[in-house]
Amino acid sequence: MAGQAGQGNSQGGRARPGNRRVAQWTRDYVRLPGIPDEYIGPDGAPRAVWTRFFEAFATLTPGDIERRFGTADRHLREAGVSYRAPGETADRIWPLSHLPLLIDEAEWQQLTAGIVQRAQLLELVLSDLYGEGRLVAEGAIPAAAIAGSTEYLRSICGIKPPGGRYLNLYAADVGRGPDGRWWVLGDRTQAPSGAGYALENRLVLSRAFASLYKSMNVERVAPFFEAFRDSLRAGADRDEPRIGLLTPGSFSETYFEHATLARYLGFLLVEGDDLAVSGDRIHIRTVAGLKRLDVLLRRVDSNSLDPLELDASSQLGVPGLIDVLRKNGVVVANMPGSGVMEARALLGFLPSLSRRFFGEDLKMPHIATWWCGQKSAREEVLSRLDQVAIEGAYRSGVPGFPGNGPVLASELSSTERERLKTAINDRGIDFVGQELVRLSTTPVWDQGRITPRPFVLRVFAAATPQGWTIMPGGFCRIADQLDARAVSMGDGARAADVWVVSDKAVPTTTLLPAVDTVRIRRIAGWVPSRAADNLFWLGRYLERAEATLRLVRALATALRDPGKGSSPVLHSVERIQRLLVTWGATSQTARTQPAKIAAEALQSEDKFGSALSLVRAAQRTATSLRERLSPDAWQVITEMVERLGQEVEDDDGVVSAAELTLQELASFAGLAQENMNRAAGWRFLEMGRRAERAINTVRFARQFAYDEASGEDLDILLTLVDCQITYRSRYLVGPLLAPVRDLVVLDPYNPRSVAFQVSALNDHIASLPTLKEGGLIERPHRLAVGLQATLTTTEAAALDTKTLFALEQDLLNLADAIGSHYFPHGPNASRPEKLTGLA
C-alpha cells in the first residue's frame, strides 16, 4: 500500500513499533473504498502533514492517548463548554473530536486567497445594494432575487455604515470535493458563529497534546483575534471606545461562545434590555446610569435589532438603533441587512459579479447553484431533478417540506415529487437547485481506532485597515454518518480543532499589548445593571443553598449518636423539619423520618428550596455571567451541581454530600474574596451574600433562640451559624439565651452575625454611585444606616421573637430596595436624574 511504502521510506527500511502502528492505521484507513479523504492525497499516498502528525502520535502508548483524551473531555466538562441544538432547551457538552483537522501551509495560502477575494466581493455587492443600486438597475442581479429575502432591509438603504464597512466579520463554509479541490458551500454574513468555539477547541487540544502541538508548528489564532479587536476599535470615533457584544441572552444556542468571545476580547456582554438610546448615541444601562457605547458586535439577527423600524415583536433589540445608525452614532458589526448575502439565490450570480468587479473568475468556486426564479434555471433544475438537491433560496429548509436540510427528489414518493415540481413551477423564486456534493472525510478517533467522517470547515475573515485577515484554522464540523450531505451541530455531529501546519517554527502570540503602548489605568469600570442583578442573585442563591445545607447536616446528625433520642433533642429536630418545610426544601413532616427529610431537602429536583434546586438556580444565573466568572469559579459551581445530583445511599451519604458541598461553597467565597477585582460587580455579589446571610441568620435565631429556647436549641443555632468555637472561648458555661443572641445577632466582630452583614452592606452601598441629585441619602443607604443604628444600640436582653421578626422584615425590605434602585428592568425602577454629560 502507498501508506506502508511511505512509512518504510521515511525510516530507511527500519520499522519501529510506533511506525508499525502508523502503518496499520494507514492500511485500515486506505482500504475504505470510494471515499476521498484528508489523509490520502490525490496521488494515493498519505499527505505529508498527516504523516508528520501520526509519526508523533504513534509514539504515545494507548494509555497516554486515553489519558490525554480524558484530560480534554474533563476540561470541556469542568469549564462548562456547551451548546444547544436547534429546537432544544437543554445544554449539551461540547462534542470535540480528539483529533484535529490538518492543513499544510501551502494549501492554506491557496484557500485563504479565495476567501479574501470572496469577502471583498461581498462587501462591494452590499455597498451597491444599499447604496447606488446599479447592479439591479443594470440587470447584474435580478431585483426579485434581492426582494425575496427577508434580510434585505429597506430601512438601511442610503445609510453609510459607521466605521466604513458592511462586513467586519465574514465566514465561508467550505468543503473538499472528490477531485481534492476546495468548494464554498455557503456564505455567512449575518453574524457568523463558531469563532469562539474554534478558540475553545484550540485551548483544549493544545493543552491535551502540548508537545505534539508545539512540534507540529501550528499557526496561532491569537493574531486574528487581535486584528479583529483592533479593527473594531479603529472604527469608533474616539480613542478609547467602549465595545459591547450584543447577545440574545443565555437561552441562545451559542451563548457560551458569546461569553467566551466577550471575555477573551475584553468586550462588554450586553443584551437588548441593557441598552438605551439617548440623543444620537447608544448607551449601556449601568449601576451608575447611562454610559456611552461606541461599537456593537452583534450576535442578534438584523430583523430583531430595532422593534421601531424592523420586527415590532422583537424583544432582543434596541428601540431607535436604526435611527442612531443614520446619525453615525454607533458602529454595528456586521451592519444590519448584511445577511442578504447568505441567500442561496445569489450564489449563481457571484461568478459574473467577480468578473465585473475584479476582471477575474472566483479563485475558489462554490457548488453549482441554479436559482429557480429565472425561467432557464428553473427548466434546467426540473429537467435534472433527480441529479440535484433542492434547497430554500433564502432560508434553511425547503418551503412546504419538513426539516432544515435539502430535499432529494429521488428519495420522494411520486406524490411528493409532483408536489415539489408544482411548487417550483408556481413560485420558483423560493427554490434553488444545487449540485450534489460528496464531502471529503477526515480521520476521527472512534472506539480506539481511526475512522473517516465527512466534514465542513468554516473559515473566518476579519476586515482590518490593512485588508482582510484570515484566522489560521477555523471551525470544523464533522458528521456522524458517512453519507452526510450537510453537517449541523444538531445532527449528532462533533467539532474539531483545525491546525494549519508550518514547516518552520511559529512565534508565540498573545492578545496582551506591549507594556509601553498602554496608558496605565486604575478605574474599575461600570457593571451593566443586568449583570449587577445577576451577581446579586448569584450571591443570594449560594447563601440560601449554604443555609439549607447546614440545616440538612444538623438534621442528619441530630439522632446519629447514641443517647440523642431525648425529648429536647426531638423537639429541636422538629423545629429543623418545620423550617425546611417553610423554606420549600421538603414536604415531609413525620418526626420518625429525619433521614428521608434530610435526603429530600438535599437533592429533591421538584422542591424549589432544596439544596440541589438552589445550586442549579445559581448555575443558571452564573450562566449569564460567564464572561465575568473565572474558570475556577464556574468549575466550583459545576462540581456542586454534579455532587448534589448523585444519589446518596444512607445517612452518612447525606452528611458527606452536605459537608463536601459546604466546603465547595467556602471555596467559591474564597475565590470571590481573593480573585475578583473590587469593582461594582464584586460589591453586588457580596451584597447578595450579605443580605441573604443576614436574613437567614435572623430566621435561625427566631427558630432556635426564642424566648423559652432549650440548651439543645441554642446549641443547634450555634452550629448552624458556625459559632461554637467562638462561644466556648468566650463563655465557660453551656449555651445561654442572652449571650447566644448577642453573638449571633448583635456582635459586630462575628463574621456570621446579623450586625456584621448589615455593616458590610452599609459599606458596599456607600461605595456605589448615587443616581439622584441633591445630595440626599438614597433609600437603600437610608435603610442600611437605620438597620445598623438599631443593631448598634440594641441590647441582647431586649431581643425577643417579635423584635427578631421585625428585624427580618427590615432586612427583606433592604434587599428589595437594592433591587428596585440599581436594577432598572421595570417602569418604576430608579433611573438617573441627570442625563447630561454622559460618559
Image (tube, helix red, strand yellow):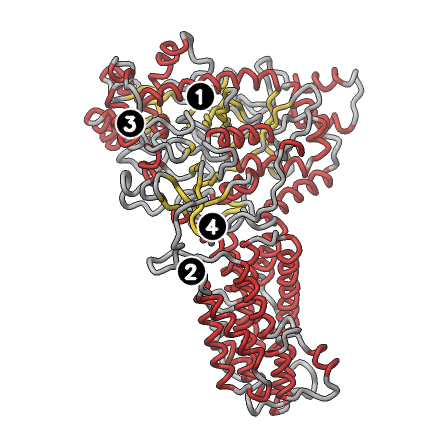
Q: Which residue is mark 4?
A: 528
* C-alpha gap between disc 2 and disc 1: 55 Å
Residue 807 in sight here: yes
Q: Which residue is mark 3?
A: 157
Residue 252 lies in quadrant: top left
Q: Earlier in the sequence, mark 1 or mark 4?
A: 1
As displayed, is residue 581 above or below residue 313? below
Answer whether labels 1 and 4 touch (C-beta < 8 Å): no
Question: How far across and how far down the image is residue 161, in percent?
Answer: 37, 28
Q: Amino acid at mark 1?
A: Ala
Closest to the camera, between mark 4 and mark 2, is: 2
* C-alpha gap between disc 3 and disc 1: 21 Å
Q: Amino acid at mark 3?
A: Cys
* C-alpha gap between disc 3 and disc 2: 46 Å
Crowding at mark 2 (Cα within 10 Å: few <14, some 14-19, many 20+): few
Q: Which residue is mark 1?
A: 119
* C-alpha gap between disc 4 and disc 3: 32 Å
Residue 587 in sight here: no
